[in-house]
Image: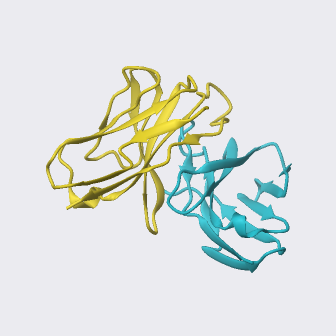
Chain colours: A cyan, B yellow
Amino acid sequence: SQQGEEDPQALSIQEGENATMNCSYKTSINNLQWYRQNSGRGLVHLILIRSNEREKHSGRLRVTLDTSKKSSSLLITASRAADTASYFCATDAERYSTLTFGKGTMLLVSP
Amino acid sequence: EAQVTQNPRYLITVTGKKLTVTCSQNMNHEYMSWYRQDPGLGLRQIYYSMNVEVTDKGDVPEGYKVSRKEKRNFPLILESPSPNQTSLYFCASSLSTRTGGFSYEQYFGPGTRLTVT
């Protein structure tokens, strides 16, 4: 069953612009994670935010978490062509011992 | 180098012919998991293992088996593959969470693209 749902499904921007992706989930979480996947390859962990945190930064990435709205956003600033990938959120709500992934947002950054 | 390896990377097989996809990690992780990824459906968990000899079903376990006899290895077995198991498969590992939810990042293997005809 799907817990997180990313929005939009696809996003196309120019290099230098900011990209914002959103994730909504249904039930209470302990932690929320964001992953990146380059075409057909394994997922790479980007950032983890705990339920008692509201915002977290890592380089050009900024993640926010609003537990009252059950949503999170991933902001990539000053996008580069190399940021072209699919981005997934994952939560641990349904089963404490596992992560449930959303369907992802496909980001295309054009030079 | 810390990594999760999967073999084979590509496999084309026929319906009913038993196959095993191997997964190995060198990070001494307790937790390991198998996912399948299909267009429009995202990643769905097949099985996971919290530690040696401890396995549990994920969201889509039908048609699959796993075993965890050693900490580093977590093979995925398809006893009688069918065309609906054509998919991209990922193995992942992480430290095991005892409290506070799933609070460690997962390391993913490069994927195994399986086609069942």
Position of B49 with respect to A8 (left or right) is left
x 25%, y 46%: residue: B63
Most extreme residue toward the left is: B16
Q: Quadrant of residue A65?
A: bottom right
Quarter of the image containing the C terminus of chain A?
Answer: bottom right
Left-right relation of B10 to A15: left
* Apparent side of residue A3 relative to residue A23 in the rendered image (left or right): left
Q: Position of residue B14 (x, y in %)?
A: 16, 55
Residue ID at (45%, 64%): B41
Identify the residue at image location x=77%, y=70%: A19
Number of numbered labels in the structure image: 0
Examine the image and state in which quarter residue B34 appears: top left
A99 lies above or below A7: above
Name the residue rendered at 54%, 51% in the picture: A42
Please give left or right for residue A44 compared with residue A46 in the image: left
Where is A25 relative to A52, above or below?
below
Q: Residue B84 in the image: x percent, y percent?
A: 26, 60
Point out residue B76 in the picture as x, y percentages from the top left corner.
33, 38
Q: From the viewer's side, name the closer residue of A10 and A30.
A: A10
Residue B43 percent location from the top left of the image: 48, 55
- Of residue A62 and residue A65, the one placed in the foreground of this image is A62
